[in-house]
Structures are given as structure tokens and as C-alpha cells.
Amino acid sequence: MVDDASWIYDLTPRIYDRKDGSTKNEIGLIADEVVSVYPQIVSFSQDEPETVNYGSSNLIVSILKEVQNLRSELDKIWQGLIRLVDWNREQDQRIKDLEQQVVELQAKLEKL
């Protein structure tokens, strides 16, 4: 699952109250929802989803892999942006050069 960590996007963080009443307004994932996405990170009690194992190496490594993938994509975007900025500067210079040529040609035409 390390090569494809896209399943983490199917997880929905929630604010919830624990079923046992021990905690209110907890932020996290609901085991009943996570089990349909990636059951490997869910603990079961009597065959029912009980808790999400946030310390699961499957979860941690998948998130790490996705962060690395996002970093790689971001690097590509930055490189593209840098090339675009450079190209834009070149085009600005070409426009200035052409404008100068137009001024010079207008001056020559006026002399005729």
C-alpha cells in the first residue's frame, strides 16, 4: 500500500463524542467510517470497529509517502513556474526591443 497512499484522501476527520462518554468534541477519525476505507488501521472488538490506530505504521508510512509525493509535485510546479517567469522576462525584453525598433523606424519615416 506504500506505492499508492491515495486512500488517505478518503478519510474524513471529524469532531465527535466518544461512545463511552469519556471524551467530548474529540478530533479524529471514526472507526466505523475508516473500516470501509482501510481496515488495516482499525482495532476491532467482538468483530465491530472500535478504534483507529493512529500509531499504525500503515497509516504513518502512507501519510509520509503521500507527503513525499506532494513535495515532488510541488517541486515540479515550482520548476514550471520558474521557467514561466523566465520566459515572461524574455518576452518582456523582446517587446521592449520591438518597441524600440518601432520608434527607430518611425523616426526614419519622418525623415523621408
Image (cartoon, grey):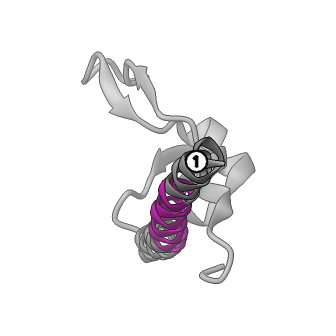
Question: What residue do we see at 28% from left, 16% from top?
Answer: 24
Q: Is residue 22 above or below residue 101?
A: above
Q: Quadrant of residue 60?
A: bottom left
Q: Is 12 displayed left or right of 4 in the figure?
A: left
| Residue 37 showing in the rendered view | yes
Q: Secondary structure at mark 1?
A: helix
The residue beneath circle 1 is 111
For the record, the magenta segment spans 76-97
Residue 8: x and y in percent read 59, 55
Q: Quadrant of residue 16?
A: top left
Question: What residue do we see at 61% from left, 54% from top?
Answer: 105
Q: Quadrant of residue 26?
A: top left
Magenta-highlighted stretch: main secondary structure? helix
Question: What residue do we see at 50% from left, 76% from top?
Answer: 72
Residue 28: x and y in percent read 39, 36
Q: Is residue 57 magenta?
A: no
Q: Label 1 is placed on what type of residue?
A: Lys
Q: Which residue is the extreme one toward the bottom?
A: 3
Residue 14: x and y in percent read 46, 27
Q: Is 8 displayed left or right of 63 in the figure?
A: right
In the rendered image, the quadrant that contains the N terminus is: bottom right
Q: Is residue 35 above or below residue 79?
A: above
Q: Is residue 53 above or below residue 34?
A: below
Residue 80: x and y in percent read 55, 69
